[in-house]
Amino acid sequence: MANEEDDPIIQEIDVFLARSLLEKLYLFQYPIRPASMTYDDVTHLSAKIKPKQQKVELEMAIDTLNPNYCRSKGEQIALNVDGTCTDETSTYSSKLMDKQTFCSSQAASNVSRYAAAVYKKGELHLTPLHGILQLRPSFTYLDKADAKHREREAANEGGDSSQDEAEDDVKQITVRFSRPETEQARQRRVQSYEFLQKRQAEEHWVHLHYYGLKDSRSEHERQYLFSQGHGLAENTELIKSPSEYLMMLMPPSVEEENEKPMAPSNVLSMAQLRTLPLADQIKILMKNVKVMPFANLLGLLGSGTDPTAVLRCVQQVALLVQGNWVVKSDVLYPKDTSSPHSGVPAEVLCRGRDFVMWKFTQDRWVVRKEVAAVTKLCPEDVKDFLEHMSVARINKGWEFMLPYDEDFVKKHPDIVQRQQMLWMGIQAKLEKVYNLLKEHLTPKKQEAQSAHPLLVSGEQRVNMAKAKVKQNYGQLEKEFQKQKAEMKSNDSSAKTDVPNIRIKEEPVGVEEPMDTHEGLNNGLVNGLHPAQGSMDPVNGHLPGGCIDRVAQELKAFVSSTFKKQFVLTLSELKRLFNLHLASLPPGHTLFSGISDKMLQDMVLDTGCKQILVPFPPQTAASPDELKVYALWEAGDTYDQHRQVLLEIFSKNYRVRRNVIQNQLSQECGEDLNKQEVDRVLKDCCVSYGGMWYLKGTVQS
């Protein structure tokens, strides 16, 4: 108490945490320079950074007029580096060392304890640092000078040896073929210093623009060092209990933590698992188990877990197959990974595994040879896919490892319907990637595959049939009487309700339902029909008053889509409509069934026009990809430019940029700048191989 009285509190300062420059603020430590010269006087010629390595390279101008600068030494260095001739590749174009390059290195591996502080009006604002980089002079120009010197020496030594070189004997060359690299050899190569250096060198430089200390942009950026909001909600990290604050000041020692028994890195106990957020728990469980019924998943998560929250989270990491949840392919094969067997990238593995999962939505059995023939993957990868979700049966194929979960399908028809829409989108992608044939799309009869190869005599079959007839005779008689009674009641009601019967009106032309939405009313959801919505058609017509609502919803979708995309093929429009349906709640009016003709008529009614693009004769595009529609008038200042652009593509399949720019300037009567031309091209076109195409018309 006596010490506290001798040391009274003079002032209390509020501390705020600024978030605006979080993970963006770096501290640069420059070399020591003479006191007469500050970095405000130095001109930054260029700056570039490699973000992943946190490596920075700055090029600064040297003040050659400074009395401390040795001009003769600067001229000698420039002569050694560039030689007597100067061109675009010269390091010092002024024949004088007038610039210096600085390269960075990390000063500290852990910068979580460091922050930049700004004191203003009795408030202290802290911004955590993302990195501390020390800048040191780079002497790569000396390497260049040595290389020039060696070239000159080689030229002097070999000046008169051209005839000798021509008379050299022919040397024998031995050709060797490398063996296939094993997994252990590949891991050693990946962990080698040479490979890491090569990976670091492959990262591209990102060029930066330097702003001086007194520049208005620098002044604007410095304002982000102050906390934007002074409320308590913005600074919850600074509000800690005394025990938490003491723990932050004095964390437990490393020795105490090492004394605890350590589990393997890939093993997580259930107690540790339940300390994680629900989404992480589900992701870890699905990644390890791979296939699980919903009831089992709830049991593992413990009592008191909200089933609705579990359903919401499991759909982010798994897909529904035969009523069970199977982990998604991109969870098992993250981006930038590859197969341990063949080295195939993760994107190709995900497509192959999605094909296997999709096959199991069609049938309980899958043949390994068929999967390998379609996906073109190595047998080990295909075997891994199948072992994730199925069991091998001798002479029969691979059977899905879990029985069909009818309880989940009946309790959650909305989830089942949404999953069906996702599988339809996956099927469309697989058809395009693998060029699936009709035999791959039609599921095989389960009876043919699941039948046991038993030998039954003719007499036994007759006896079995007789026994089955006797067993079902009573039930068949009851059903017959019931149908007879219903027929009588229908005949009596038909006489009075004839005027109310609505007959389906068939269109004159051939109109088929949209391929992407056919499954909404007639398709199977993992083997079951989807739950019927409240908008069921009656004799081919919608209930009264629903037609207008369907048209309004469809028109709103088409109008908003074309205002964002401007140009769409019919195939892409159907895909976007399919995704839109997947986001709608069950029973929505658009689930009543939308045909291709209805969708195309609505596109034309909303002010769009069909662009007759002259595709090349050898094109492999589908009929839906050949139909291109564009928004003719969007109501902005670029309508006329877009119309001229669309007229160009109605006569040409692909066009060069200069042709487009000249035509726009000629038709619009004004010289358009680069930004305006870029805006019009971005709305309607894509660039490929130096040529411009309308969106969706590029044929790879």
Image (cartoon, helix red, strand yellow):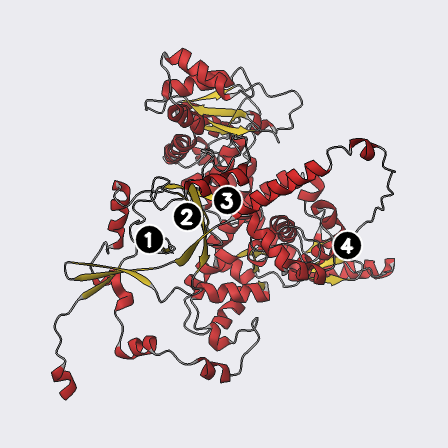
Q: Mark 3 or 4 closer to N-term?
A: 4
Instruction: Count residues near mark 3 (Cα–Cα under 10 Å), then give few for <14, some for 14-19, many for 20+.
Output: few
Tell me, for residue 585, which label it has, or none.
2
Instruction: Identify the image quadrant of residue 379.
Output: bottom right
* Direction from residue 67 to residue 226 in the image, left or right: left
Tell me, for residue 180, which label it has, or none.
4
Q: Given this view, does label 2 or label 4 mark the residue nearer the observer?
A: 4
Q: CA distance from mark 3 to mark 1?
A: 108 Å
Q: Are marks 3 and 2 in contact (CB under 8 Å)?
A: no
> What residue would you read off at disc 1?
34
Residue lying at 58% horizontally and 58% vertically, measured from the top left: 332
Q: CA distance from mark 2 to mark 4?
A: 53 Å
Kindly identify the amino acid type of the residue bearing the numbered disc 3.
Ser
Q: Mark 2 or 4 closer to N-term?
A: 4
Q: Give the answer, above or below, for where 537 lies relative to 284.
A: above
Q: Given this view, does label 3 or label 4 mark the residue nearer the observer?
A: 4
Instruction: Count residues near mark 4 (Cα–Cα under 10 Å), then give few for <14, some for 14-19, many for 20+.
Output: few
Instruction: Identify the image quadrant of residue 122.
Output: bottom left
* Direction from residue 693 to residue 23 in the image, left or right: left
Q: Nearer the viewer, residue 200 or 171?
A: 171
Residue 641: horizontal and vertical position, in percent?
39, 19
Q: CA distance from mark 4 to mark 1?
A: 59 Å
Q: Mark 3 or 1 closer to N-term?
A: 1
Q: CA distance from mark 3 to mark 2?
A: 38 Å
Q: Are marks 4 and 1 in contact (CB under 8 Å)?
A: no
